[in-house]
Amino acid sequence: MRTSLVIIAAVLIAFVSGAAAVVARAAPVAVNYVALGDSYSSGLGAGNDISSSGSCARSSSAYPRLWADAHAHASFTFAACSGATTQDVISSQLSALSARTTLVSVTAGGDDAGFSAVMETCVLSSQHACLSAVSAAEKFVANQLPARLDTMLTDIADRAPAATIIVLGYPDLYDVSHPGFCLGLTGADRTVLNQGAGDLDAALARAASVNHDKFADVRGQFAGHEICDSGSWLHSVDIFAISSSYHPTAAGQQDGYLPVFERAAG
């Protein structure tokens, strides 16, 4: 009798332990999401600015905020700031990370390379000035940016060792196949600007690969919605709103960046 009771008890313990293990495996991991980066992540140009964000120009229409609104999460920290370089991310944004962070998104590198100034030069100055500005930026991206990106991604991983880190790229700016007229730009200008953006994306993809992070390429998602397309998701140069020039509109954040980030985040 005693032996039978011991056997039954052992079976029950094994069953309960096994059931508990199944429940533990099935329980979803709490998502603690931190959004880092520059104006493409803060949402500059998308409208609906969050007043408390000040010059960081964070928008409630930016893809990080949209993702957080649509997905279950334990915490969300919106640290991205307009104008942030890789060093700004390191010095001003990494404090938002911790060992509890499970998901990180980041866009960075464009401000290091001075691409905003390059694009304005191409629209407002001569073709020669445009080609020179793009060439200088491409040299910076090839020779100096990789080390900066590597340092930033290494520091992110050190602060958030359990996190999935997603590096998002930048879209092509112009539809070079568009036969229509594009104010202030020649076909050569548009081509070299896209080449510069492509070089930047290639540097981001390499840095993500070296650091075992994910690179999320948005160029395919923006295809057919670049500047000069009738349904563009990007602001062209606007002298009355110069800071938002070449940045995604609300549609660019919602329909361009968000789906790409969702796929990468899983």
Image (tube, helix red, strand yellow):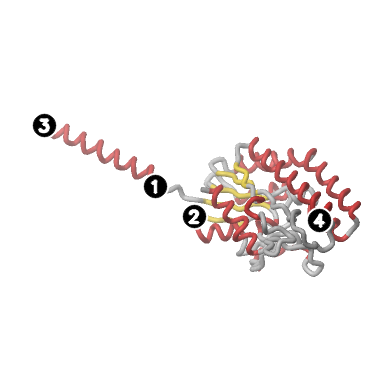
Q: Which mark is residue 119?
A: 4
Give the number of the mark in front: 1 or 4: 4
- Type of residue at label 3? Arg
Q: What residue is shown with label 3?
A: 2
Q: Which mark is residue 232?
A: none
Is there CB contact under 8 Å for labels 2 and 1? no
- Mark 2 lies on a secondary structure that is loop
Cα–Cα span, label 3 and label 2: 50 Å
Indicate the quadrant containing the N terminus: top left, top right, bottom left or bottom right: top left
Q: Is 136 positioned to the left or the right of 9 in the image?
A: right
Is there CB contact under 8 Å for labels 3 and 2? no
Q: What residue is shown with label 2?
A: 73
- Tell me which corner region of the image, top left, top right, bottom left or bottom right, holds residue 12: top left
For marks 3 and 4 on the same chain, the one whose residue lies earlier in the sequence: 3
Give the number of the mark in front: 2 or 4: 4
Q: What residue is shown with label 1?
A: 27
Q: Is residue 87 visible?
A: no
- Type of residue at label 1? Ala
Cα–Cα span, label 3 and label 4: 84 Å
x and y, in percent, of residue 152 in the image: 68, 43
Q: Is 227 positioned to the left or the right of 220 in the image?
A: right
For marks 2 and 4 on the same chain, the one whose residue lies earlier in the sequence: 2
Cα–Cα span, label 2 and label 4: 37 Å
